[in-house]
Amino acid sequence: MGKEIEAKFINISKEVMVKKLEEIGAVKVYDERLLTRCAYNLPIHDKDAWVRVRDEVDKVTMSYKKESAQSLDGVEEIEIVVDSFEKTREFLKSVGMFEKAYQETKRMRYEIKEKGVVFDIDTWPGLEPWIEIEADNEEIVKEYALKLGFDWKDAMFGSAPLVYEKMYNIPSDFIKSKCPILSFDDLPLELSEQNKRK
């Protein structure tokens, strides 16, 4: 099982970050696109593990993910490419998986191929954009965080629900298991302006 080695830096300006990425030699892989995903509970109870199907426009992936710690390499992942978003959803339901959430996000990707580093600028409903820096080892992630002007103490690790918990007065498990639809057009009341942390 592979580990994701990535750090996120939240509340960024997309325009400023794109300029900085281009200044350090990163090349755009694709423009911002809408990604749709469905998350599933496992038949065996494990609150830290889930299955995700994601339509990434040019491919559809199915992933098993397990969050073991809030650290640089705290998420284990097995990912495969599948041929249909809807058929994969049907398959998972038919083998007893419970679809707990439909989620939309927007993503723009840059990379520096020769260094094996990927930069994803993500926007989730109700949140300011963030950047995820992913590479094969911790040193490269830290190196490029510094090149982009970030302070390592501001790095966040783990999945999106932790960002929601930081920004709103909600527990992280609200997004994980109590929010069946998370879309740009229909925000749940829990993600209202009044519920933002001061």
Image (cartoon, rainbow, N blue to C red):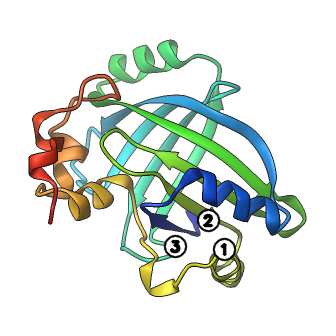
Q: Nearer the viewer, mark 1 or mark 2?
A: 1
Q: Secondary structure at mark 1?
A: loop
Which one is in front in this view, the residue at disc 3 or the one at disc 1? 1
Horizontal and vertical percent for residue 84?
A: 58, 16
Q: Nearer the viewer, residue 122 or 14?
A: 14
User: Residue at position x 63%, y 76% from top?
Assistant: 145
Q: Are marks 1 and 2 in contact (CB under 8 Å)?
A: yes
Q: Report x, y in % for residue 50.
A: 35, 45
Report the residue at 48% width, 67% height from top: 9
Q: Earlier in the sequence, mark 1 or mark 2?
A: 2
Q: Give coordinates of residue 167: x percent, y percent.
A: 24, 60
Which comes sooner in the sequence, label 2 or label 3? 3
Secondary element type, mark 3: loop
In the picture of the structure, the residue carrying the numbered disc 3 is 73
* Label 2 packing within 10 angstroms: few (<14), some (14-19), many (20+): many
Instruction: Kindly identify which residue carries mark 2.
Output: 133
What residue do we see at 48% from left, 31% from top?
53
Q: Residue at x 84, y 69 (%)?
A: 115
Give the residue number, with chain letter if any, for mark 1.
Answer: 148
